[in-house]
Image (cartoon, helix red, strand yellow):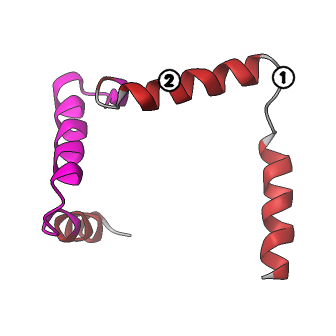
């Protein structure tokens, strides 16, 4: 997609009237503009932060699945679909 296509799609989504979407998009853009790096951690919910932290703990404990394993499963799935 081009930058203009991204912009137009974002506008369509925002015009849908979804207040939560509008607030989330605003928060992400504001965070990006304020620090120049787009630190999304400050705009996600506590529940999302807890999920991410639990996921990182699982990875540290060796309970993760490698990207290559996931890709293999996806390739198998797509060939069957």
Residue positioned 23% across, 53% down in the render: 21
3D distance between C-alphas at marks 1 and 2: 19 Å
Side of 3 where 56 appears, left or right: right
Q: Which residue was labeled with disc 1? A: 62
Side of 7 where 56 appears, left or right: right
Q: Which residue was labeled with disc 2? A: 50
Magenta segment: does it hold 66? no
Magenta segment: does it hold 26? yes
Q: In this view, does 16 lie above or below 43?
A: below
Residue placed furthest toward the front: 47
Residue positioned 20% across, 36% down in the render: 27
Q: Give residue 12's position: percent from left, percent from top.
A: 19, 71
> What main secondary structure does the magenta stretch of the protein show?
helix
Residue 58 falls in image quadrant: top right
Q: In this view, does 32 lie above or below 7?
A: above
Side of 75 where 4 appears, left or right: left
Q: Do the residues labelled 1 and 2 touch (CB within 8 Å)?
A: no
Side of 53 where 5 appears, left or right: left
Residue positioned 17% across, 44% down in the render: 23
Looking at the rendering, the stretch of residues picked out in magenta corresponds to: 13-41
Residue positioned 22% across, 29% down in the render: 31
């Amino acid at each position: 997609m081009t930058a203009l296509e991204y912009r137009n799609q974002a506008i369509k989504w925002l015009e849908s009237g979804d207040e939560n979407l509008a607030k989330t998009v605003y928060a992400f853009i504001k965070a990006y503009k304020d620090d120049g790096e787009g630190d999304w951690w400050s705009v996600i919910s506590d529940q999302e932060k807890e999920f991410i932290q639990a996921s990182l703990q699982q990875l540290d404990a060796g309970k993760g699945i490698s990207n290559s394993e996931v890709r293999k499963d996806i390739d198998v799935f797509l060939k069957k679909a």
